[in-house]
Amino acid sequence: MTHETQKKRRTVTVRRTLAMGTIAATTLGGAAEAAGKVTPELSEAPDWIQVASAEGEDEGEGEGEAASHGEGEGEGEGEGGGAMLAPEAGLIRDLGFMEGHLRAGMALYRTGDLAAAKTHMGHPIEEKYGAVAEPLAARGLGRLEQELGALAAAAEAGAPADEIAAQYDTVLATIDEGRNGISAARNAAGLVALTRVAADEYTVATEGGQVSNLHEYQDSWGFLQVVADEASDLAGSGDPAAARAGKGMLAALEATDAVFGELQGGGDFEMDASVIYGAAARMQLAASGL
């Protein structure tokens, strides 16, 4: 990453859910007007504007598809607008996608839900590695494929949690290396895109006003944990513009805590995917100065 501070190696704990705040998700009239097709004038615009435009174009269509498909297609759905992302922003989104699965998987493994954990641990290598193989190879990080495979295999075999945790740490350290050297603007654009993936997953998860797809609910939770951590890194940057953007993005994310309960879907919480979509829009605005 571009901020000067060295990123701390992540510890293997069940991450906090995003801290509750009083910031409610709002509909942004100006952003809504801007969320049409990308015009030639926008082709040279900052990443966050291009993301807003592309995602706005896909939103209605994407939510409908997400609600009508199962897990695999639901997870890919959030990538529609991402086609407009710069390659490095797309890499940030895709690395976060993989890490989010692992976050959920590790948390579930810790609680003893091995069946669900195995599924989450296997998805990064099964669903996403092809999208990141080339840029990671260019960065000398092709080892991630083997590391992900080993972690998935260990989980499938029901290895002790401590062994899984050590492999998990290794994978996350490599994922972090993949983010090195990417600008704050590209990071922010990728995090906004990942937040919209989380919203798409949540839409699938809560179809019918209940947690009807627990796996997608857990995916959405995991993705937002990654977004929060990466936005925190931006907020701690020595670059004032990046720090402001990171703090604004964290503030926007606070509202999403209200739409999550327990990791297994229990608890009293508001089921409203628009809160996550709203957070993504506000994150875009927060990053507008990059």
Image (cartoon, helix red, strand yellow):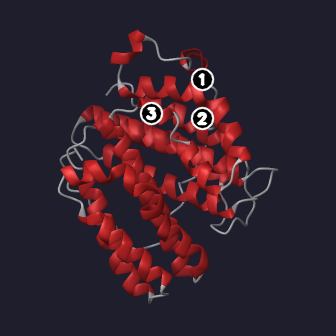
* C-alpha distance separating marks 1 and 3: 23 Å
Above or below, 143 against 62 in this view is below
Task: Name the residue beneath numbered marker 3.
Answer: 83
Amino acid type, label 3: Ala
Which of 165/36 is in front?
36
**Residue 156 on image: x %, y %:** 49, 81
**Earlier-in-chain disc, 2 versus 3:** 3
Task: Name the residue beneath numbered marker 1.
Answer: 28
Side (left or right) of 223 relative to 186: right
- Residue located 39% across and 33% down the image: 85
- Residue located 24% across and 60% down the image: 142
Amino acid type, label 1: Leu
Residue 230 visible in image: yes
- Residue located 26% across and 53% down the image: 136
Q: Is mark 1 on a helix, strand or loop?
A: loop
The crowding category of the residue bearing disc 2, from other C-alpha atoms within 10 Å (few below 14, some 14 to 19, many at least 20), is: many
**Residue 49 on image: x %, y %:** 43, 23
